[in-house]
Amino acid sequence: MPVNYMRWLRSYVGPQRILQLRASGFIRDENERVLLCRRADVMLWDVPGGTIELYETPSQGLVREVQQETGLLVQAERVIGVYGGHEFEWTYPNGDQAQIVSIFFACSIVGGTLQPQGVENVKVAFFAPEHLPPLLSRTAPMIHHAFVDQSEAFFN
């Protein structure tokens, strides 16, 4: 039986800030609208994704998280950017703290049906680039870099 790494780690460090690796996706529909998830904890919108599990590759974690959160099956196509720093410090509702390093992938939809999954998000929807809803502060620059469509990945 696989170990739940985060639960195991938290049993030793409690709510202390830990380094957390996240994979998220820039996913567009046939009308070039962007898929976003409205988070249940802060009621702001974010790109779908989550923490990479022990023994997963970043793209495997991305595919699993997107399917869990949205019902869609995606394929990672390229890395848009790698993000971290103060903008990615996070405190969860239970008090657990994290310093997130986020790998942001451009993705294509290869299957599934759009529907909110689990308890982390209250809604999932596609948005036109000129009509984006209120975003998490860390999400806005990521989406900006995705629309610029640079040939090389952004990193800081």
Image (cartoon, rainbow, N blue to C red):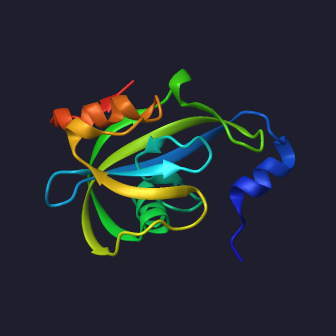
Closest to the observer, 109 or 35: 35
Choose top left, top right, bottom left or bottom right for residue 108.
bottom left
Viewer-nearest residue: 118 or 79:
118
Locate the C terminus and report the quarter of the image it occupies.
top left
Q: Is residue 139 left or right of residue 40?
A: left
The N terminus lies in quadrant: bottom right
68 shown above or below 1: above
| Left or right placement of residue 115 versus residue 9 in this view | left
Residue at figure coordinates x 34%, y 34% from the top left: 142
Establish if 140 lies above or below 52: above
* Residue 50 point in image, percent of width and height: 52, 52
User: How many marks can you see?
Assistant: 0
Whole-percent x, y for residue 45 in the image: 45, 43
Q: What residue is at 21 percent from the left and 51 percent from the top?
A: 33
At 43% from the left and 62% from the top, the residue drawn is: 66
Residue 131, above or below 154:
below
| Residue occupying image coordinates x 76% and y 56% | 7
